[in-house]
Amino acid sequence: MKLFTEQELVLSSQAVLSHSYSPYSKFKVGAALETSRFIYVGTNIENRSYGLTVCAERVAVFSAVANRDRTFRRLALSSNTKDFITPCGACLQVLSEFCDDLPILLVNCDGKVKKTSLKKLYPSPFVLKK
């Protein structure tokens, strides 16, 4: 069970910003999801039909799940703006499928980090009652 430093996680999210496919909005997002074994990265992938665009966070989550790695520890989310961006509602719901809470590091284009959590950003996720 490898433990990664906060800096490794942040740098991983920043490193994939250049991989973003965002020709329409020019809004680049990089995500780094730390699990018990690895750091999975993702970047936003736009489509001219905006509804088909996929967020960086979900790309990272889906990559982890595809590798049978569902023990999420932390998420770092970087962008090419001075603002601290947060995951959208769809990404928060997907994250909540796999963990009740998760530390989230928001990173702006200057490398400043703001700490928050899944519970703070999304306190009442949808739960299907059985």
Image: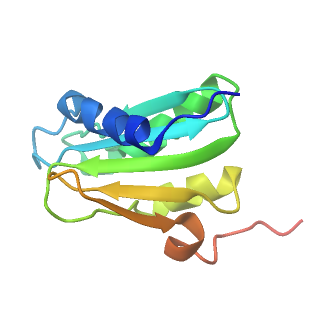
**What residue is at 60 percent from the left and 57 percent from the top?**
102
- Residue 29's spot in the image, x, y percent? 26, 45
For the residue pair 47 and 1, the one nearer the viewer reads as 1
Q: Residue at the far top: name it.
A: 67
Q: How many circles with numbers are drawn on the protein?
A: 0
Way the structure is coloured = rainbow
Residue located at (69% from left, 49% from top): 98
Residue 79 to residue 122: above or below: above
Coordinates of residue 55 in the picture (x, y in percent): 36, 46
Residue 18 x, y percent position in the rendering: 18, 30
Which corner quadrant holds the C terminus?
bottom right
The answer to whether 21 appears left or right of 40 in the picture is left
Compared with 127, 57 (above or below) is above
One can see residue 43 in this view: no
Instruction: Give x and y (percent) for residue 48.
Output: 18, 41
- Residue at position x 22%, y 34% from top? 20
Q: As rendered, which of 45 and 103 lies closer to the eye?
A: 103
**In which quarter of the view is residue 2 placed?**
top right
Could you tell whether 60 is left or right of 128 in the image? left
